[in-house]
């Protein structure tokens, strides 16, 4: 499995890739650049449109007619312009990080301690208003679902936690993956059609594939950059993995967008409800 450059660019902190199957395009953000990328024609001559957000952005969720963007402590809808839907009132030492639309149609998004050491991060669900469902996180990061199980990364702890989804509540199932024996820290994550977890290792230069609750990964893929940030399945057959990265380390290809051809398939992203 050899990674290829899909888009050579210099994103300061590329993150949050989401495949839009309806429009056959990839949406992703440059957090520190405050930019939202819309990458099209991913199987041909690639084109990339860049939107400038009102502030730092961290993740994206699709709706039927538009998309949502989490920013520092606010959630916006974009349908030609950015409209704020809601915000949290938290200490200034936290900001939103990774987020996704859930199977319930709500937007799930976590916060992180900007100092990256204190357990002041939380996981929120937005259903017209924000509700905390997990606390005592340092950096709430990659998240995804498989059937009735929800997975969540806390990067400095090098763990992926599993929860049983019970209505609007989560029941802890313990630690699904620990990455202490592997370089970097777990960052973005996606789940394939078989329920395996694919994890980008920030600072480790690898992607790993895990069966939940196993001690070792099924697969380890070496990437051409050290700071690998996030990943998602996409393409017409959902058999490609798109990978974001960061230029923070000063590498020649840092901040570029990569693609992997796989034997696995992903799933279409969940759509969020429309909040007017």
Image (spheres, grey):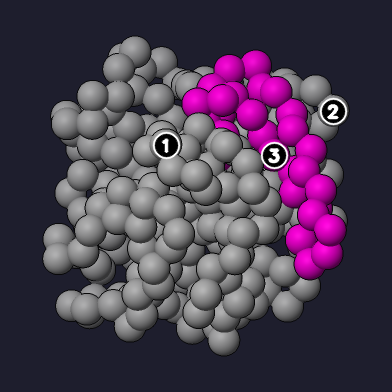
Residue located beneath label 1 in the image: 250
Q: Secondary structure at mark 3?
A: strand
Residue at the spot x=35%, y=17% of the render?
90
**Left or right of 262 on screen, residue 276:** right
Name above or below for residue 147 compared with residue 232.
Answer: below
Residue located beneath label 2 in the image: 80
Q: Secondary structure at mark 1?
A: loop
Query: In this rendering, which labeled residue sits more in front, label 3 or label 2?
Result: 3
Res 98 visible: no
**Residue 44: image x %, image y %?**
83, 64
Name above or below for residue 236 compared with residue 21.
Answer: below
**Residue 213: image x %, image y %?**
24, 76
**Farthest residue, direction front:** 252
Q: Nearer the viewer, residue 106 or 36?
A: 36
**Mark with earlier residue (3, 1):** 3
**Whether label 3 touches label 1, CB < 8 Å:** no
**Residue 20: image x %, image y %?**
74, 56
**Mark with earlier residue (2, 1):** 2
Residue located beneath label 3 in the image: 37
**Residue 207: image x %, image y %?**
39, 65
For residue 266: magenta? no
**Mark with earlier residue (3, 2):** 3
Magenta span of residues: 30-59
**Farthest residue, direction bottom:** 263
Q: Nearer the viewer, residue 9 or 92?
A: 9
For residue 39: magenta? yes
Judge the density around disc 2: few (<14), some (14-19), many (≥20) Cα neighbours within 10 Å: few
CA gap between label 3 and label 1 equals 21 Å
Residue at the spot x=64%, y=48% of the render?
8
């Amino acid at each position: 499995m050899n990674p290829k450059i899909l888009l050579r660019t210099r994103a300061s902190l590329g993150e949050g890739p989401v495949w839009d199957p309806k429009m056959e395009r990839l949406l992703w953000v440059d957090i520190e650049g405050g930019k939202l990328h819309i990458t099209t024609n991913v199987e041909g001559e690639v084109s990339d449109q860049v939107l400038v957000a009102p502030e730092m952005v961290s993740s994206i969720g699709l709706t039927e007619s538009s998309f949502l963007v989490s920013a520092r402590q606010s959630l916006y809808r974009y349908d030609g312009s950015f409209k704020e839907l809601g915000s949290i009132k938290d200490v200034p030492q936290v900001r939103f990080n990774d987020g996704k639309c859930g199977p319930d149609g709500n937007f799930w998004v976590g916060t992180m301690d900007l100092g990256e050491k204190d357990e002041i991060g939380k996981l929120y669900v937005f259903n017209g208003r924000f509700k905390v469902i997990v606390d005592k996180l340092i950096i709430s990061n990659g998240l995804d679902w498989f059937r009735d199980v929800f997975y969540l990364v806390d990067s400095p702890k090098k763990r992926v936690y599993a929860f049983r989804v019970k209505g609007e509540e989560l029941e802890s199932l313990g630690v699904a993956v620990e990455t202490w024996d592997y370089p970097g820290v777990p960052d973005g994550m996606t789940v394939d059609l078989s329920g395996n977890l694919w994890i980008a290792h920030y600072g480790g230069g690898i992607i790993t594939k895990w069966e939940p609750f196993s001690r070792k990964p099924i697969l380890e893929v070496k990437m051409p950059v050290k700071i690998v940030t996030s990943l998602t399945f996409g393409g017409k057959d959902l058999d490609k993995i798109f990978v974001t990265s960061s230029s923070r380390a000063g590498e020649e290809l840092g901040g570029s967008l990569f693609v992997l051809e796989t034997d696995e398939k992903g799933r279409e992203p969940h759509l969020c409800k429309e909040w007017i």
